[in-house]
Amino acid sequence: MSSAELRRISSGGPYEDVIGYSRAVALPNGLVLVSGCTAADAGGPYDQTVKAFEVAFKALAEAGLGAEDVVRTRMYLTHARDVEEVGRAHKALFDAVRPAASMIIVSGFVDPNMVVEVEVEAYKEVAR
């Protein structure tokens, strides 16, 4: 697959140019991969989770997909004590969708105010 077949989506975030990544990459087969999304300024674990997924949804919308097209989520948390709040936020957003999901405890993020980071994969069949 050539890079011309890929669509790279930017959120305009400051780290995209510094680190060299895209917010999302849409593949020609209908799969969209969304990079890790965070929300350090959103408050507690529930609010950070909702806001982080909203960042991901915005990238998906640019690719023509929505929350209903999400097939996999990954949630990275800095503390096991936040599992319930992060899980509650995930359920509020995805209860009807039921994507494959992982919740992983990590040692930390680049900003100590971040307690959760999420990744999303979504798929919508491409019309031929």
Image (cartoon, rainbow, N blue to C red):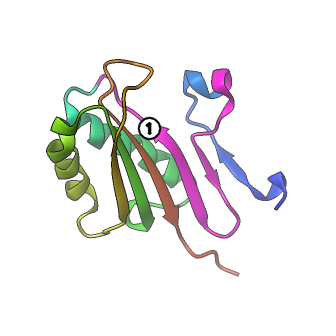
| Residue 69 placement (x, y as % from top left) | 44, 67
Circle 1 residue:
37
Q: Is residue 21 magenta?
A: yes
What residue is rendered at 28% in x and 43% in y? 50
Total numbered labels placed on residues in the image:
1
Q: Label 1's element?
A: strand
Instruction: Say above or below: 32 vs 105.
Output: below
Tell me the quadrant of the picture where the C terminus can be found: bottom right
Closest to the observer, 108 or 87: 108
For badge 1, the amino acid type reads Cys
What residue is rendered at 45% in x and 21% in y? 110
| Residue 7 placement (x, y as % from top left) | 70, 52
Left or right: 91 as drawn, with respect to 10: left
For mark 1, does the 10 Å Cα neighbourhood hold few (<14), some (14 to 19), or many (20 or more) residues? many
Instruction: Say above or below: 106 vs 120.
Output: above
Closest to the observer, 7 or 74: 74
Left or right: 12 as drawn, with respect to 5: left
Which region of the structure is painted magenta? 17-41
| Residue 35 placement (x, y as % from top left) | 53, 43
| Residue 25 placement (x, y as % from top left) | 63, 50
Q: Is residue 100 magenta?
A: no
Closest to the observer, 21 or 14: 21
